[in-house]
Image (cartoon, rainbow, N blue to C red):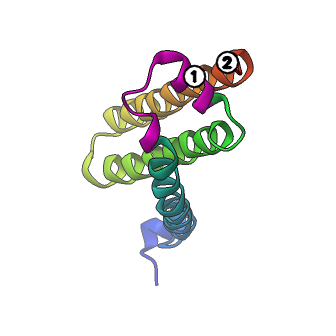
Amino acid sequence: MTTPLGLVRGLGSAKSGTATFIKERLTGLALFFLTPYLMVVLMPVFGQPYPVVLNAIGSLWIGPALVAFLLINATHMALGMRVIIEDYVHTTVLRYALLLLNWAFSWGCCLLAVIAVIRIMFLAVQP
């Protein structure tokens, strides 16, 4: 059941909401498993000297998991903020501006963090 205006615009009640809902749940599930893993693996590193931390992040058990965590977290954050912006911002121009800023902030932070982790992974000095 759609309204006549919805038929004219081609917008029904389930055009993209289900896909966003599923993506949010899948990224949340992935974070549910990745977060405790990284906490357990990185807990012994807290308070250690700088080279020890670099070697830990550069290891094959932590580095790739950290990159995956950053990518999944950025996706989850961008999707969640997008839903909030779409639900509560009613001015069209402001909504599109905020959606663009949300995308740029989420993926900009993610890009910087992933580059940092990858640099550490390839430049860390192994003992």
> Horizontally, is 116 left or right of 93 in the view?
right
* Neighbourhood count class around disc 1 (C-alpha, 10 Å): few under 14, some 14–19, many 20 upward: some
Which residue is painted at 56% across and 65% down in the image?
Answer: 26
Q: Which mark is residue 54?
A: 1
Q: Position of residue 113 (x, y in %)?
A: 54, 26
1 and 2 marks in contact (CB < 8 Å): yes
Disc 2 marks which amino acid?
Ala
Which residue is painted at 43% across and 46% down in the image?
Answer: 77
Which residue is painted at 45% across and 19% down in the image?
Answer: 49
What's the magenta region?
43-57
> Horizontally, is 92 left or right of 24 in the view?
left
Q: Position of residue 50 (x, y in %)?
A: 48, 17
Q: In front: 117, or 24?
A: 117
* Neighbourhood count class around disc 2 (C-alpha, 10 Å): few under 14, some 14–19, many 20 upward: some
Q: How many marks?
A: 2
Task: Describe the element under mark 1 as helix, strand or loop.
Answer: helix
Quadrant in the rendering for residue 91: top left
Q: CA distance from mark 1 to mark 2?
A: 6 Å
Disc 1 marks which amino acid?
Leu
Instruction: Identify the residue position indicated by label 2 in the image.
Output: 124
- In the image, residue 100 above or below residue 49: below
Query: In the current view of this chain or complex, which residue is farthest to the front?
Result: 127
Q: In front: 85, or 77?
A: 77
Q: In front: 35, or 2?
A: 35
